[in-house]
Image (cartoon, rainbow, N blue to C red):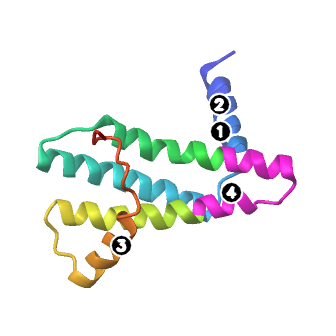
Amino acid sequence: MSINVINEKIVAFIEWFIGGVDNALLALILIVGINCIMGLLSCVKKRKFSFSTILKQLSILLVVGIANLLDVQLKSGSLLRSLSLSFYLINESLCFFQYLSDIGVYIPDRLLNIISQFTKLDTNDSNTKQD
């Protein structure tokens, strides 16, 4: 078996797992990639590197894949996959603006207030210790 055949089988499995490639998935992959870069820039500026940030962003595709498998089992079309894609597109877009703010790009105060309202919901950050 050649390397090309193995690569094709791996790509076919990934495409089956995540339910095919559509515009929403391409947008999510693009924004996750941009957020990985922005997260690294933010970590460099803060001088605090966290590998878990990158793992969290890459695990989004795993959640989309599991949602797709549930859709197949429940015969619900692509309801759960579409919901998970929409949720993560919105969430990653908000994170993008937060990373911009972290590296020093001016973000209007009104937009920062809206973003902070959504980010206050995530109070259990894995990087902080709880008593």
Asked if 67 appears above or below 93 in the picture, the reply is above
Tell me the residue that label 2 is attached to: 10
Instruction: Pick whichever of labels 3 and 2 is earlier in the sequence.
Output: 2
Q: Majority secondary structure of the magenta segment?
A: helix
Instruction: Give the side of residue 53 with respect to residue 103, left or right.
Output: right
Single out the residue that lies furthest toward the top.
1
Image: magenta residue range = 66-85
Q: Amino acid at mark 1?
A: Ile
Give how far across and how far down residue 99 sits, in percent. Answer: 26, 60
Please tell me how crowded label 3 is: few (under 14), some (14-19), or many (20+) other residues with Cα within 10 Å: few
Residue at 26 percent across and 75 percent down: it is: 112
Instruction: Pick whichever of labels 2 and 4 is earlier in the sequence.
Output: 2
Camera-nearest residue between 21 and 111: 111
Instruction: Pick whichever of labels 1 and 4 is earlier in the sequence.
Output: 1
Tell me the residue that label 3 is attached to: 117
- Secondary element under disc 4, as helix, strand or loop, is helix
Question: Which of the 4 image quarters holds residue 91?
Answer: bottom left
Instruction: Pick whichever of labels 1 and 3 is earlier in the sequence.
Output: 1
